[in-house]
Image (tube, helix red, strand yellow):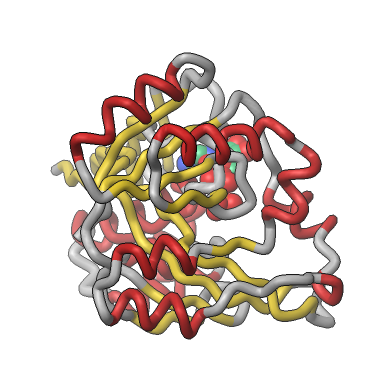
Amino acid sequence: MKVYEKAPAKINLLLDVLRKREDGYHDVEMVMTMVDLADRLEMEELPRDTIIISSQAGYIPLDEKNLAFQAAKLIKERYEVKQGVYIHLDKKIPVAAGLAGGSSDAAATLRGLNRLWKLGISDKELQVLGTELGSDVPFCVTGGTAIARGRGEELEMVHQPPQCWVVLAKPPINVSTADVYGRLKANQIVKHPSLKDMMRAIEGQSFQGVCESLGNVLEDVTLPLYPEVQQLKESMLRLGAEGVLMSGSGPTVFGLVSKESKIARIYNGLRGFCKEVYAVRLLG
Ligand code: ATP
């Protein structure tokens, strides 16, 4: 028996850091949503008690470091499943890009194995399991649009933002999320983005309002370290994107565009100097 799951990429429309906690993590306030750029997972039951991961992408770990492996191990142990599983990851989301590709694969594995082994676990319980795998995993279990607080695992589901196009561009550098948070001086953030403004724009379905309320305090760390990310933001704006932001800890930059007729110009303009460019839709 086989099951298939899609694991979409996430973007942060807003990412604020409120404080550094005693335990070393940061308290964040984020607005997360998903885009139609997704990995595809195929999961097939194995009679032996083993977990095997394969992928066409040569640059991700295929052993216990892979988040899909960790998710499978967790669900097997917690629900005492004796069978094994073979998981093939068809990677489409760029890796270490700030798009939560690994977290979304982990969430898709939890959903898929719940179905494959008919475990009857609720979404809420899957989210609790996901917390053990990473801060973004609980959100990726259900997707949609949510405000995330705490370490990112306390979720409040909200309306979908107005539908639009999203151009994603990843410069050829890899950024470590842990390194960016490590360098952030949470008590020296000069400008915090306004969650209130963003929520007003989403609830009023104001595309312009969403564009004006975009904000990510991690840009303060990543942009000075990697000037190419700043250049990419400027190019996207010049080519006609209406709102532009770095996603997560970067280096991917996304641009929001209301009219399909503008996409070709932005896409082709960026492809001139950036190999990884995608034009997708918000996931409704
Ligand atoms: P986030 O925004 O949640 O920090 P990211 O998009 O920056 O995530 P990922 O693509 O999730 O980063 O990859 C981060 C690291 O996790 C990579 O260095 C990669 O080796 C490792 N990794 C483990 N499992 C996976 C997976 N299934 N897909 C991609 N990367 C994985």
Q: Position of residue 130 (x, y in %)?
A: 46, 67
Occupied quadrant, residue 143: bottom left
Q: What residue is rendered at 41% in x and 61% in y?
A: 211
Closer to the camera in the image, 176 or 80: 176
Occupied quadrant, residue 174: top right
Q: Is residue 63 visible?
A: no
Q: What residue is rendered at 52% in x and 75% in y?
A: 153
Q: Position of residue 18 (x, y in %)?
A: 70, 80
Q: Residue furthest left?
A: 1
Q: Position of residue 256 (x, y in %)?
A: 36, 49
Closer to the camera in the image, 57 or 165: 165
Q: In the figure, is residue 185 to the left or right of 114?
A: right
Does residue 43 lie above or below 74 as drawn?
above
Does residue 117 lie above or below 49 as drawn?
below
Q: In the figure, is residue 95 to the left or right of 4?
A: right
Q: How many marks?
A: 0
Q: In the figure, is residue 113 to the left or right of 185?
A: left
Q: Is residue 78 visible?
A: yes
Quadrant location of the C terminus in the rendered image: bottom left
Q: Ligand 1: give its quadrant.
A: top right
Q: Position of residue 39 (x, y in %)?
A: 33, 39
Q: What residue is rendered at 63% in x and 33% in y?
A: 231
Closer to the camera in the image, 223 or 170: 223
Does residue 104 lie above or below 41 as drawn?
below
Quadrant location of the N terminus in the rendered image: top left
Closer to the camera in the image, 209 or 13: 209
